[in-house]
Every structure is written in C-alpha cells, then in structure tokens.
Amino acid sequence: MSPDSDKKHGGMSNEELNRPRYPISVVADMFDVHPQTLRLYEREGLLKPQRTARNTRMYSEVDVDQLKSILSLTEIGVNLAGVEIIMRMRNQIEQERMRFKAILKEIWERYKIDPNQWDDVTSTDLIPISHRKVVKVNRKAKDESVETIDADD
C-alpha cells in the first residue's frame, strides 16, 4: 500500500486494509456493476478476493481500491489485457518506490542525516536548490542592461 492509501483510509494498518469485509453483492452495488463482472475480473486475475469457509467471495479495502482502478481504466477504453499490464507495472513501481525509500532511510541513519533538514523530501530535484537567481534583461533600442534579482527577496 502506498502512503496515499494510508491517507485515504484514515491510517488503517495493512492488516485492516486486507481484512475481508464485503461480499460480492455489496461490492457490485457499491460500483453499480453486475456480480458476473467481478467474477470475470477474478478469472482474469485482476482481483483476488478472499474466500470464506463456505467459498463466499469477500472483498477487502485493497480489493475495492483495485476495483476502482480497474473500472477507471476500462472507462477510458483500456481492455482487460491492458488493465493487467498497467496494474502489474503500477505494482512494480510501488515495490521499487518502497525499496528506494528503505535504501534512503538506511543512508539517512548510517550518515546521521536528519530528513527534516530537507525542504521537500519528495522533490524530484536530484540536487536540492536552496538559492535561485532571476535575471531580468531590459532591452531598449541600443541600450541593454542586465539586472540580477534574488528569487528569495
């Protein structure tokens, strides 16, 4: 689960998010789809609801989130094979993101770096830029002048 999932689920633990909660009829009603559609997604390997002792499908919050993604992709015209590829790629990206986060945490701990010293830990900048300059060029006929202004001012 991503940090975004934690936010939208009110900080639920992974155990709570994976706990089976909803039978197929409830999930079908939640999303206004036929239960056969959910069974099809399961056959295609896109959803993997848990089963009770009586073999009843039970969907967790994770399954519901997965279904939201599937439905949004099919709504824009992605076929089920494409949905499967996109979902697999999303999972791989999430795994790599979590691996990167663990490596970064290890580096911070090893070199005693306080992550709070960074303005934006989620920044995509390779090198954080703390001081930027803006250059203003005035062009008037034959007279050219250049003025440097601190961006922080």
Image (spheres, grey):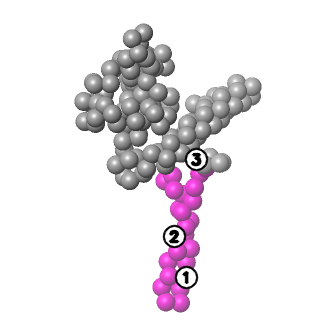
**Residue 8 at least partly seen:** no
Give the residue drawn at x 31%, y 27%.
27
Q: Dot 1: within a 10 Å radius of its alpha carbon, few (fewer than 14), some, or many (20 or more) residues?
A: few
Q: Position of residue 52 (x, y in %)?
A: 41, 13
Can I make out residue 51 in this image?
yes
Residue that label 3 marks: 124
Residue 115 percent across, percent down from the top left: 61, 31
Name the residue rendered at 54%, 63% in the picture: 134
Residue under label 2, please give it.
136
Residue 66 percent location from the top left of the image:
43, 34
Amino acid at dot 3: Thr
Q: Is residue 7 above or below residue 22?
A: below
Of the residues shown, which amino acid type is indicated by label 2? Lys
Residue contact at pointers 3 and 2, CB within 8 angstroms: no
Segment tinted magenta in the rendering: 129-153
The earlier-in-sequence mark between 2 and 1 is: 2
Whichever of labels 3 and 1 marks the residue nearer the N terminus, that label is 3
